[in-house]
């Protein structure tokens, strides 16, 4: 499925990245090539106060199908302006963590239209997404090499590596939780469910915390199981529904205590409202932010297409809520004194 996220790249310039360095000893924004992966560079943003010595958390932010690393950064900005304080990379700069925007695989005459192999493609399930899935690109190996490369250049806290992403990038976040739980502390996918688990291939080696964010009026990855209702990425093969995906995680995490619900403050007149659903009795935290009336968009992010195409963009909250969940997680059972 490619929900036209490439259109989020139009207009404003991208991040003001400089050259990559063998090692970084201070705040920076840079574009780095990744050895062994031609044409799959990544953008790296290091926070204010970074000193090159003190380990910092790392967040991978994965673009949607049809997007790229530039689109991923812009999609998280309220007005699509990369210098806006609302952007994910600006939040990272101010809150002391590194963020990386990687590139999926581009093909043929449209190399900047990129996708991730997030799984599926068997037993009637949709292959997510596009040629990356159809051609079996090993994006798990790509992320492993990416993490190695970043950790060679930056003092990264290995206990606090996180992944988020929108749509195809959200589904890829789920796949990484299934297959790289020994390196990734937690995930927070947006608008993309666990297609890999739907095809029966999710086996994390440790209980991994999950925050799944999804709008009930999302036409491109519908809340209920079914094919997308987007202008592109058609076909009859279904995406896994949100409830089924969360049931799969609840089973994997051994949740046996039911759920509780909490309404988040409804501060914006945008026709959406968010409920936080929390599972109890789990071996690792499992939460769902159900955005009633929300569309296929980053919370308080860029409305990259008209509402009639992607649905409403929720404005009650944004990157801070996602980071609050992620930053409370670590590979070990308790955060150490660095917090």
Image (cartoon, rainbow, N blue to C red):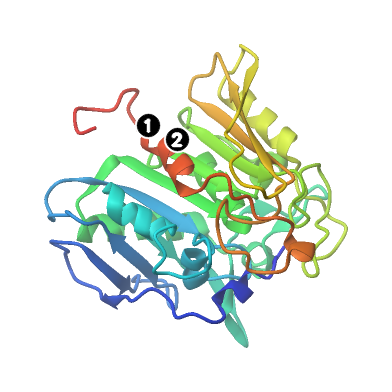
Residue 8, given in percent of the width and then of the height, sits at 58, 72
Q: Which mark is residue 325?
A: 2
111 and 213: which is toward the camera: 213
Residue at mark 1: 328
29 and 233: which is toward the camera: 29
Q: Can residue 330 be seen here?
A: yes
User: Is residue 144 depicted above or below 292 in this figure?
Assistant: below
Residue at the outermost right position = 236
Label 2 sits on a secondary structure element that is helix
Which residue shows up at 49% across the image and 62% down it? 77
Which residue shows up at 23% across the image and 27% down it? 336
Q: Which mark is residue 74?
A: none
Q: Quadrant of residue 255?
A: top right
Q: Can residue 181 be seen here?
A: no
Q: Quadrant of residue 83?
A: bottom left
- Could you classify mark 1 by the number of other residues whose Cα lies within 10 Å: few (under 14), some (14-19), or many (20 or more)? some
Residue 31, given in percent of the width and then of the height, sits at 33, 73
Marks 2 and 1 in Cβ contact (< 8 Å): yes
In space, the residues marked 2 and 1 are separated at their CA atoms by 6 Å
335 and 316: which is toward the camera: 316
Q: Is residue 336 left or right of residue 320?
A: left
């Amino acid at each position: 499925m490619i929900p036209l996220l490439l259109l989020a790249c139009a207009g404003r310039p991208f991040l003001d990245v400089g050259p990559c360095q063998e090692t970084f000893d201070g705040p920076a924004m840079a574009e780095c090539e990744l050895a062994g992966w031609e044409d799959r560079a990544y953008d790296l943003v290091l926070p204010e106060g970074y000193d090159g010595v003190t380990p910092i958390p790392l967040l991978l932010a994965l673009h949607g199908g049809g997007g790229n690393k530039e689109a991923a950064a812009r999609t998280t900005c309220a007005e699509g302006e990369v210098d806006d304080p609302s952007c994910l990379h600006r939040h990272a700069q101010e809150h002391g963590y590194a963020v990386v925007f990687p590139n999926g695989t581009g093909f043929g005459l449209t190399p900047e239209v990129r996708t991730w192999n997030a799984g599926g493609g068997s037993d009637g399930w949709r292959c997510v997404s596009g040629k990356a899935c159809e051609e079996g690109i090993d994006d798990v190996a790509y992320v492993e090499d990416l993490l190695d490369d970043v950790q060679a250049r930056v003092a990264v806290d290995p206990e606090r590596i996180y992944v988020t992403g929108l749509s195809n990038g959200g589904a890829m976040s789920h796949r990484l939780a299934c297959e790289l739980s020994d390196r990734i502390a937690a995930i927070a996918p947006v608008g993309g469910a666990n297609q890999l688990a739907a095809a029966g291939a999710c086996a994390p080696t440790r209980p991994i915390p999950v925050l799944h964010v999804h709008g009930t009026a999302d036409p491109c990855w519908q809340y209920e199981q079914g094919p997308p209702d987007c202008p592109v990425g058609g076909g009859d093969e279904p995406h896994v529904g949100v409830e089924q995906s969360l049931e799969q995680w609840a089973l994997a995490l051994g949740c046996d205590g039911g759920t509780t619900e909490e309404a988040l403050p409804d501060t914006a007149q945008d026709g959406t409202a968010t409920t936080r659903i929390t599972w109890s009795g789990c071996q690792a935290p499992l939460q769902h932010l159900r955005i009633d009336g929300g569309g296929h968009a980053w919370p308080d992010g860029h409305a990259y297409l008209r509402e009639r195409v992607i649905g409403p963009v929720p404005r009650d909250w944004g990157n801070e809520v996602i980071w609050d969940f992620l930053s409370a997680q670590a590979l070990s059972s308790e955060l150490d004194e660095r917090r």
